[in-house]
Amino acid sequence: MYYYGNSPLFFVPSYPDEEIRHTKDEGKLDHKEKALFPVDEALEKGNAFRDEYKGYKNYVPVKLTAKKEQDILMLNIQAFTSAAHDLELYLDIYPGDKRLLDKFMEYAKKANELIEEYQQKFETLTPSKAKDKNGTFSYVLTPSVWLKLN
Amino acid sequence: MYTYQKRMPYPIDIKKKDVRLAKYILTQYGGPYGELGAALRYLNQRFTMPDERGRTLLTSIGTEEYSHVEMICTMLYQLTRGATLREFEEGGLGGHFATHGAEIFMTDSNGQDFSVTGIGATGDFIADLSEDMAAEEKARATYEHLIDLSRDEDVIEPLLFLRQREIVHYNRFKQMLEVYKKEFNR
């Protein structure tokens, strides 16, 4: 997964189709179809794949909620980007899994749209989107992540 | 190349100062099974993977590990924010304060500076991916120790998230290893 700061696309597939190594098993996946958590639950659990989630003792991951519109939008960004990232790691190994690739593209598209929306409504997350209405370089107005609470 | 977004992968909002807990969590910054070592391990090993799948997987996971370094540092910052010299001493970080003041530094919980000697780089993709699986398990075990040592939900929640990521990475490395073993007849 690469992030292009100067492009409206934050998520693009890691490498183009023609570079995918073609094996003799092409088209026959040697793994079961992966069942996914909904993206919000995947963020809470830290894992997009239902069959791989392993909890610790009796701890139950907290339901992530927010009151302010900005914080709700950030949670949605975190949910879709995390889910897209998880699918990307899987597709790195099995680039021929068309069903997961479609799902990845859906998540990545949604993540990109949400990041755009967040930057338009609230604050810039990247320097390339940092010229505000007053002509100020607004990237320095966005608090660093350790100061930003949500 | 790298670009950066000013946002967290998972929300962290620690309201209660706790220097002693920060001392324990330090190990996941500069300790032997910490996030910094993980990032360096994978981003270093990727050059000798046999094809683009392994190279890409190690790049992607190594990059994610850097975001985890930032999560750990954020937790350390918030746990020690506004702490007095007295609180640093009582929390067991008097020695840290003597050298680094209130600044975060890459050591383990006992003040041992970060070392790369535990990072495997064999030039053999089977050996390296096997080491990566072990590294993820050691990090998972460390997170479980830290969760056991924590009482604050604001700390436990991101620790549970980070622990789960180790499980995900272990599974990916295992799958990559199995695919390569089969295809390269190793």
Image (tube, coloured by chain):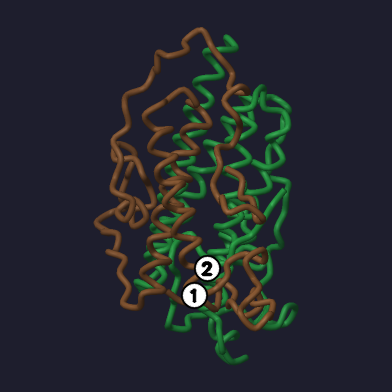
Q: Residues within 10 Å of mark 1 (few under 14, many from 20)?
A: few
Q: Secondary structure at mark 2?
A: helix
Q: Which mark is residue B174?
A: none
Q: Foreground residue, A13 or A45?
A: A13
Q: Is residue B60 above or below residue B16?
A: above
Amino acid type, mark 2: Gln
Chain label for disc 1: A
Q: Is residue A107 above or below residue A100?
A: below
Q: Foreground residue, B30 or A118?
A: A118
Q: Is residue B98 above or below residue B105?
A: below
The colour with which the image depicts chain B is green
Q: Foreground residue, B108 or A68?
A: A68
Q: Are marks 1 and 2 in contact (CB under 8 Å)?
A: yes
Which quadrant of the structure image shows residue B145? bottom left
Please give the name of the residue rendered at 38% of the width and 66% of the height, measured from the top-left corner: B156
The colour with which the image depicts chain A is brown
Q: Is residue B40 above or below residue B97?
A: above
Q: Position of residue A123 (x, y in %)?
A: 54, 74
Q: Position of residue B81 (x, y in %)?
A: 55, 84
Q: In this figure, which residue is indicated by the disc labeled 1?
A: A122
Q: Position of residue B177 (x, y in %)?
A: 53, 25
Quarter in which the N terminus of chain A is drawn: top right
